[in-house]
Amino acid sequence: MRQRASALLPGATPISSARSTTRLFSPPQYPTYYQHLRDSGYRVGCVGKLDLAKPDNWCGTEGKEPRTYRWGFTDPIEIEGKILAGRVPEPHGPYGFDLAKNGFWEGLHEDYELRASRGWITGVSHD
């Protein structure tokens, strides 16, 4: 079974931790699985969309926000998803900033604005 970062954060699967969602808030007083690994001397990396609940969708320009270090990561690179990147008026995460740097962000944003204006199809992929 594929485990998401949100399932591993508390050190339990969503079923055994009574969670049915990836939108997980982890109380700071409870150590995470990643903290245990870090404290045992491991370098703990993450790359991608972590699906961990955050107070906002900001991932920083390089994906190295302080909260990822608090969760126990030593080498984080957290990115926003492409749908979120395309639906905001300006880049706000590593994916969007990289697209902007290479001249592709405006095209993505325009594409998602057009899709939103036509109404979103549900139950199927837009890709």
Image (cartoon, rainbow, N blue to C red):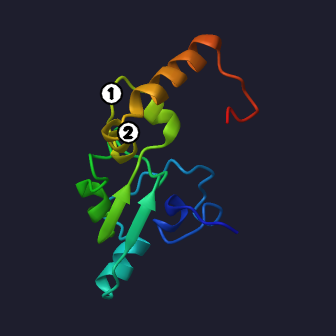
Q: How many labels does the image show?
A: 2
Q: Dot 1 surroundings within 10 Å: few (below 14), some, or many (20 or more)? A: some
The answer, for residue 47, to whether it is visible in the render is yes
Q: Is residue 121 above or below residue 55?
A: above
Q: Where is residue 81 in the image (x, y as percent from the top left)?
A: 48, 43
x and y, in percent, of residue 21 in the image: 59, 49
Q: Nearer the viewer, residue 35 or 115?
A: 115
Say which amino acid is labelled 1. Glu
Rendering quarter of residue 88:
top left
Classed neighbour count for the residue bearing mark 2: other residues with Cα under 10 Å, few (<14), some (14–19), many (≥20)? many
Q: Which of marks 1 and 2 is nearer the N terminus?
A: 1
- List the residue tagged with mark 1: 90
Q: Looking at the image, is 104 positioned above or below residue 59? A: above
Residue at the (55%, 51%) spot, across then down: 22
Quick one: SS at disc 1? loop
From the image, which quarter does the N terminus lie in? bottom right
Q: In which quarter of the image is residue 98?
A: top left
Asked if the residue at tag 2 contacts the one at tag 1, i.e. Cβ–Cβ closer than 8 Å, the answer is: yes
- In the rendered image of this protein, does residue 46 appear above or below residue 41? above
- Give the label on residue 21, or none: none
- Label of residue 96 in the image: 2
Q: 19 and 98: which one is in front? A: 98
x%, y% of residue 65?
A: 26, 53
| Gap between marks 1 and 2 measured at Cα | 8 Å
- The extreme left residue here reads 66
Callout 2, which amino acid? Answer: Gly
- Label 2's element? helix
Q: Is residue 13 left or right of residue 36?
A: right
